[in-house]
Amino acid sequence: MTALVFLIVYAGVLAFLAGCVARALTYARMPAHLRWEIYPVPHEEPERVAYGGSYFEQPRWWTKPLRSHWVTELRFMIPEMIFLKGLWDHNRSLWYRSFPFHFGLYLVAASMVCLVASVALTPAGVELSGTAGVLATAARILGAVGGAGVLVGALALAWRRLTAPEVRNYTAPGDVFNLIFFVVTFGLIGAGLLSRPEGAPGAWEVTRALLFFDTSIALPKLLAWGLVAGSLLVAYIPMTHMSHFIAKYFTYHKIRWDDVPMRQAQRLAKEIARYLSYRPRWAAPHVMADGRRSWAELAMLNPAQKGDQ
Amino acid sequence: MSKFTRIEEMWRPDDRPLLHLTNEDLMPLPPPLNHPSLDRPWTPLTEAARQQYECRLDDTCAVSVPKPKSPAEEAELVRKFLAGLDKLFAREDNWTFLQPLVLTLEHCARCQTCSEACHIYEASGYSELYRPTYRSEILRRLYFKYVKHGGLVSAWQHGDIQLNWPLVARLIELAYRCNLCRRCAQVCPIGADNGLVAHELRKLFSQELGIAPKELHDNGTMLQLKVGSSTGMNALVVKDNIEFIDEEISEKTGIEVRTPWDVEGADILLIHNAGEILAWPENVGAFAVIFTVAGLSWTMSSELAAYDSVNYGLWYDDVQFARIALKQIEAARKLKVKRIVLGECGHAHKALSVVADRILLGDANIPRESALTLLHELIMSGRIKVDPSRNDFPVTLHDPCNVVRLMGVVKPQREILAKIAPKFREMEPHGVNNYCCGGGSGFAIMSGNNFADWRFHVSGRKKLQQILNAFQDCLDPSIPKYVCAPCSNCKGQLRDIIKYYGLWDSNRILYGGLVELIVNAMVDVKPGFIDWEWH
Ligand code: SF4
Ligand code: SF4
């Protein structure tokens, strides 16, 4: 049975990675859109970021050097990524539910990194000690706190989904299912670890066994079910809007903050020239698309002038 | 009627509107309008309009789509809608906004953080129908069902929808209950954009079904492409009008101005929103005075569409948008000017400076500059000398969304006001967080049926609240007050709403542009440029 569970875990992780890459590629391969930024744009000059200004504020802006400040951008991004600052600022009551959930996931991910590092630092047959021991302890603490955060957060979010009037119109059965999926997975893993009999393998041993495909360990039943649920969950995430950690890269960097002027974007100009040769099929008469005319040609036509009609 | 509208009601087959609002339902206003009974009664939609047009969304009707005459006609319209939906998500047809649209639909967490940011939703007393996510939810479900061809599992994951003509008819109207101000998008933690959804729906209806409000299409982009301006003025008329303005302004200010036309090699091609020429000639004249005193090398162009900076395509149609932008650029190229300066028109700023940027390849990418930046340079450098004591009255500043939140021009106008208006006070919130005037995305020029009533009561209400709050300490009619709105469309909305509520008569609240305030303070100019008369 252990071998089967392990194979499911490997498959789950692979499906997660493949799903994430596929989704990221789908978005990355979409054509560059027209500019659509919203201010503040945090890589602007720091004094302008403070109030949301742009390079357009400078007289003859096109003659001035345009610099992109990654430090100020990071100053915005880190609090957003780690602490969900936007939600704190604009939707505090949701933050109290969403933050434990998301931060819990980060802690669980950190705990897994510590476990892998600890196993890697511990040769076979050698007792856990030194740095590896510290890492194992850190993993236990991070895992426990993170797992509890995810559980509490997911339950609170599910409760909101089921009861809050503002999401009544916007809650499909799948939304509740997603959150319950987290609750069940983390509940099973937590219960599996806490209730395992004396001498049964814990997180560290399971990590080691997984890394070396050591199927000789006897997985406690609950923990085995937890691992299966977790594998299915990670495989499922990229198929849903929960993969917004991928989407956010594009919505922030490629849309909201994408203020590069065309005068400085030679490669983009080539791409746009290609899009302008696309042949749109819009059917309204004023568009004058006939399946043969390109965007560039249509843009030069004038539906209000006799000669062009 | 309940203010909670379920998603399923959108495909309700009957003709009854989904929402009816009364003054009691709306967001309260400060004095002097601090009770629903002090508000104006709504003009109801006429029975004739209800009979003739698809008005089954709410109390008004912005697009006036004629009712189909038969079920077959309805079915045909639904078929066309589906064809348009398909194109909205096809690379070749909609490369212009495909990526942000798909990201918004696939990743909105439906958390509702954006709702509180929307002035329309708030002003309507939090009516569900106007929640920024309501129309997006419809498009999202349609996307997963008809574009991604999701089956039962997809419906379980994303929610189901039934496509019929009533749904399409309501969606056409609902696409025009959003100012495209993108304040909602600014606060979205995911980066989703419900304003864009409204924009894309409008495009689908225009580019596929040929459905758009008359004011934007027939009398907007089409008229501009036909005669040169959405005001209907051809080049001869516009030159005539400008000549008249030059004469009037020269007399009024004591500065001899003559607007140069079609000067090859000039430094600046100035493009006004031509609506200014007819409705606010003093704005156009003020520019001429400032440019003359500063000794700038400038010109206006009499080429088609190049003496009118408006580009209504920005709000509903990418193809029309591109056509107008290219015409304006072409005129600048022909004159070999070094830069285009955009007068006080917000959407023209964003259209030509930002949104059109990527289709202006090579030489076509002539620099475009905001007049606010140029004016700032002229005043701060001392080329224009001002005496602030001439503007000794309370002034507040409206931030046009297209110039401020969507282009990042925030500070120049403030620094100018700090220099010329000693009683300047900010409204709250301001800068990039300010609210739309309520006339954005074409509403300011849309008054068909009783739509103007809707924009006064609902979309313009938040701005009205901000203005009244900014002047609470000086509401007394003996004190003249000035709302500075450096945008033609915003001024149109402010003019209409101030008039509607009689705030000039009762409280002496006037509105106007920035250049009028500058000229009013210019030491080289005869005092008293601002008339303090209602117009
Ligand atoms: S658009 Fe953004 S803020 Fe609004 S519901 Fe979707 S994810 Fe939340
Ligand atoms: S774009 Fe503006 S008006 Fe439209 S939904 Fe968003 S906040 Fe409301």
Image: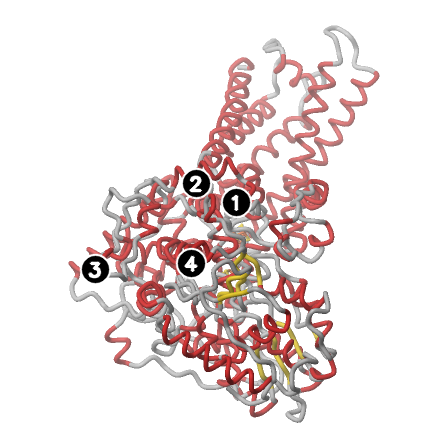
Q: Give how far apart the Cα atoms at labels 2 and 1 are.
A: 10 Å
**What secondary structure is marked by label 3?**
helix
> Taking B51 as reference, is A282 above or below it?
above
Q: In which quarter of the image is the C terminus of chain A?
A: bottom left
Residue bearing the label numbered 3: B74
Q: Tell me the kind of residue under disc 4.
A: Ala
Marks 3 and 4, the one that precedes in the sequence: 3
Residue bearing the label numbered 4: B331
**Quarter where residue B464 is shown:** bottom right
Marks 2 and 1 in Cβ contact (< 8 Å): yes
Q: Give how far apart the Cα atoms at labels 3 and 4 are.
A: 44 Å
> Taking B31 as reference, is A274 above or below it?
above
**What secondary structure is marked by label 1?**
helix
Q: How is the image coloured?
A: secondary structure
Residue bearing the label numbered 2: A272
Marks 2 and 3 in Cβ contact (< 8 Å): no
Q: How many labels does the image show?
A: 4
Query: x and y percent of residue B119 in the render?
Result: 54, 67
Query: x and y percent of residue A305 in the render?
Result: 26, 61
Comparing B428 with A203, the one in front is B428
Query: x and y percent of residue B94 in the render?
Result: 37, 46
Which residue lies at the image location 46% right of the left edge and 82% below the top edge?
B244
Report the side of A129 relative to B41 (left or right): right
> From the viewer's perspective, is the residue at label 2 or at label 4 nearer?
4
